[in-house]
Amino acid sequence: MANKTQSYREPLGKAPRIAIGLLLGLQIIALLFNIANGGIRWPDLSQGLTPTAVSDLGAVIGLFLPALLAIGLLLVVTIHDGVAHRETPLSVVLRWILRFLLIVWSALVLFPVIWMLYSSLRTAMEFIESPWALPTAFDFSNYVTAWKESNFASYVLNTVLITGGTTVLFFLMLTTTSYILGKYKFKLNKVFNGFYFVAMMIPSILVLVPLYFQLEGVGELVNEIILAITGEAGTFSMTDNRVVLLIVYAVQALPPSIFLVTGFVRSINNSFLEAAYMDGAGEWYIYQKIILPFIKPIVLFQCLTVFMATWNEYTMAFTFLGLTEEHHTISVGLQHITEIFSRGQEFGVIFAALTISMAPILVLYGIFQKQILNGTDSAEGLK
């Protein structure tokens, strides 16, 4: 008896799926724009196919054309891949429903960003007439105004210095502390582990007020010492100091990261360290050549997370640096820009400033997105 064979087809590949995703995303964005500009104008067919009804019908068909094309392409992929992978059409459809929900969510997230980008290229009058309409021409003068008519360069410089310093200090404290807690045995090891575990549970916002008054008290004590030594009143401040703020940022970000990275350090086989010791290697060599390469992925992920969080942080920056505008970061400076330019309804300038502040983070995420997405993968961390 001859065996019954099944036909087999090669899968269509990624191109149709990418096309479906792009079409669905385009459809969602088109609907959002249409709704924002007054809603969909449905054709009135009560009086027959009048020129106005035909025009409205054509506009509706054009509006939903990306969805129609996506559905047609989806049917082709469903039928073809159902045969290629021995799948039922239902399983393929369910998979695409999940993908559609993800596309909807992505479009809802991207729409405010796209709106901010093209709004930064519009004049004040265009924004007043219709907040959602596209710009009639690409006008980059808003970026020039945002940069020159405020202390934006100072805001950017302060943010770069504080964020960069925080990340470097965080990296040094995280890697060295995790190495000591993970590989050294001493009496207070469990005490320090318990301390970081408890500190991880305390929200940083709860210690903001006590920390402020403590640092203010330390600054007053330093000024008293300066007065006693030099005879002149000191002007040292711990609560309007960029260096102090970056130290606070780094220290507050440590507990959860140490709790995670210490586990990675403990999982490193001690035979690597023992072999290095037998060859005469010192602690610095072991830390640099053995420990860091093993924990590089997870540490890179933690540093990127701290960098992005510090760049966008507002509450502590406003509390500690709010007295002196020359010390303000971008997040605090944006508040001043909003107050200044909203009076004249120059919202394009405000959106331009927001775009400038957001651009470095988008570039950073674009470069390191793989490391960010795979940072908490233990298998990746211990390759």
Image: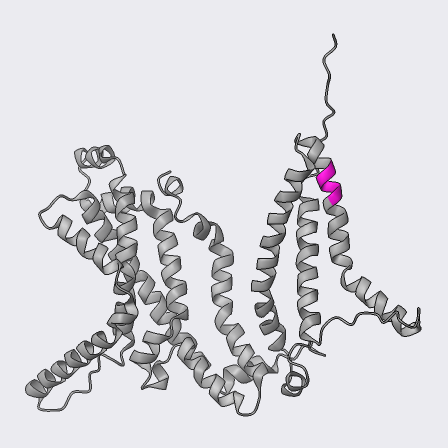
Measured as percent of width and height from the top left, residue 12 is found at: 71, 38
Which residue in the rendered view is the most extreme toward the left?
A: 228
Residue at horizontal 53 percent and vertical 73 percent from the top: 355
Magenta stretch: give its range.
75-79
Tell me the quarter of the picture where residue 10 sits.
top right
The quarter holding residue 77 reads top right
> Can residue 196 be seen here?
yes
State the residue in front, 47 or 375.
47
Q: Position of residue 173 (x, y in %)?
A: 24, 57
Q: Quick one: quadrant of the C terminus?
A: top left
> Which secondary structure class fits the magenta region best?
helix
In this rendering, the answer to whether 13 lies above or below 363 is: above
Which of the 4 image quadrants contains residue 221?
bottom left
Mark count = 0
Q: Can residue 150 be seen in the rendering of this structure?
A: no
Query: 112 and 334: which one is in front?
Result: 112
- At 74% from the left edge and 10% from the top edge, which residue is drawn? 2
Image: 46 above or below 184: below
